[in-house]
Amino acid sequence: MTRQALLSRTLLLDLETTRTGRIRHVGAVLGDTVFEKKAPAHGQKTLARLDALADRADFILGHNLLGHDFPVLAAAHAHLRMLQKPVIDTLYLSPLAFPENPYHHLVKDYKLVRASVNDPVAAARLAAAVFTDQWERFDTIGAKNPRQLDFFRFCFSGTRFNGFSGDGLAAVFARLGASGMASPLAAQTWFLDATDGIVCLPAAIRQLPELLADAARRPMLAYCLAWLQVAGSNSVLPPWVRHRFPGIPSVLRELRDLACQDPACRYCRQSHDPDGHLTRFFGFSAFRPQPADAKGRSLQREIVVSGMRDEPLLAILPTGGGKSLCFQLPAWCGIGAGDCSPSSSAPFRP
Ligand SMILES: [Zn+2]
């Protein structure tokens, strides 16, 4: 199915609410039909009319529907039929389509960049414009790597967000031609292949079976994957993703920040190699042998290793002992999940 055909059968929706969550302005578009109601005096009647319009749609599309509009609608009228429809939430798709920074020019973290806050019809149409760009990006991704869309479809099938089905998100990938994954094991095999050399292999093998077996946690892996593919550039995981999926920072920390001892792990041997980084960044062939610790090991090297593991450490060295390198080298390595690390999680309030 083409994007146009899908959108022609999709209700575009935006609600504006008061701070207390009361609906004050409703905007919706389905094909040529525009629905707009301001400060509905008879809220239930308006919602019933909106629900009747939504009966004609296959999907409901909007930005942050799962986190905002649907919970608000459910609180106003729990038995709306539209609440059972598959949802295409452009907020959820954005970090998958545009994991690099800056994000899509129409999306700023969890909000649409919009000219007017009092025009929900325009906002609903804006979400459709964002979706159009997302669709095109996914189409490009799928042309290069169709299994990635299969993985995304698998990650969102059978999930629920705030009690609402995530199947609309899986359906987007299905409409793009994705077939999903035959099993969690097939998904694991593909993930390990796709992240070869960019994550710690033993950590991935340890974490994946449990995460992939749990439909509620699979979406985290979709966001982790999208982020991992651009990690090392200016990519940042949007605060709302960390807020909605609080398990992600610890997953990424295990995959990227903690060095394993397996000599076969290509990622750890390259990313957590203090001696290699010393040569690469400073041109020295070895750390200073003195001062040494009680076991005769270079204190400078032990401090750097500790810093690369992100461990808190108080180091006291004499003047000329090479202190600057002790903090500069771990910083240069730029290891880890950067903005994703739990310690740097900015407070987020939707
Ligand atoms: Zn490793």
Image (tube, rainbow, N blue to C red):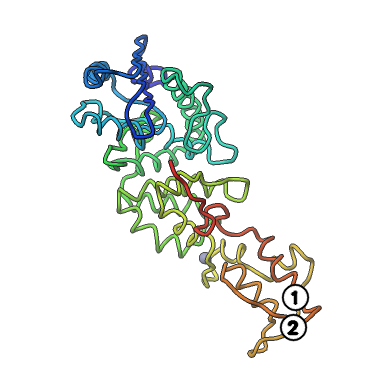
Towards the viewer: 119 or 299: 119
- Percent coordinates x, y for residue 113 in the rendering: 53, 28
Quadrant housing the N terminus: top left
Towards the viewer: 118 or 284: 118
**Eyeballing the image, is 282 above or below 33?**
below
In space, the residues marked 2 and 1 are separated at their CA atoms by 8 Å
Is the C-beta separation of discs 2 and 1 under 8 Å? yes
Circle 1: is it few (<14), some (14-19), or many (20+) Cα within 10 Å? few
Q: Residue at x 31, y 48 (%)?
A: 216
**Eyeballing the image, is 314 above or below 250?**
below
- Percent coordinates x, y for residue 79 in the rendering: 18, 29
**Eyeballing the image, is 255 above or below 245?**
below
Question: Is the distance from the Cβ of mark 2 to the nearest ligand 1 atom less than 8 Å?
Answer: no
- Mark carried by residue 317: none
- Mark carried by residue 289: 2
Secondary structure beneath label 2:
loop
Secondary structure beneath label 1:
loop
* Mark nearer the viewer, 2 or 1: 2
Q: Is residue 284 left or right of residue 191?
A: right
The type of residue carrying mark 1 is: Ala
Q: Residue at x 61, y 51 (%)?
A: 232
Towards the viewer: 37 or 90: 37
Q: Is residue 111 left or right of residue 70?
A: right
Residue reaching furthest to the left: 79
Quadrant housing residue 277: bottom right
Quadrant housing the C terminus: top left
**Eyeballing the image, is 343 above or below 58?**
below
- Mark carried by residue 286: 1
The type of residue carrying mark 2 is: Pro
- Percent coordinates x, y for residue 149 in the rendering: 42, 38
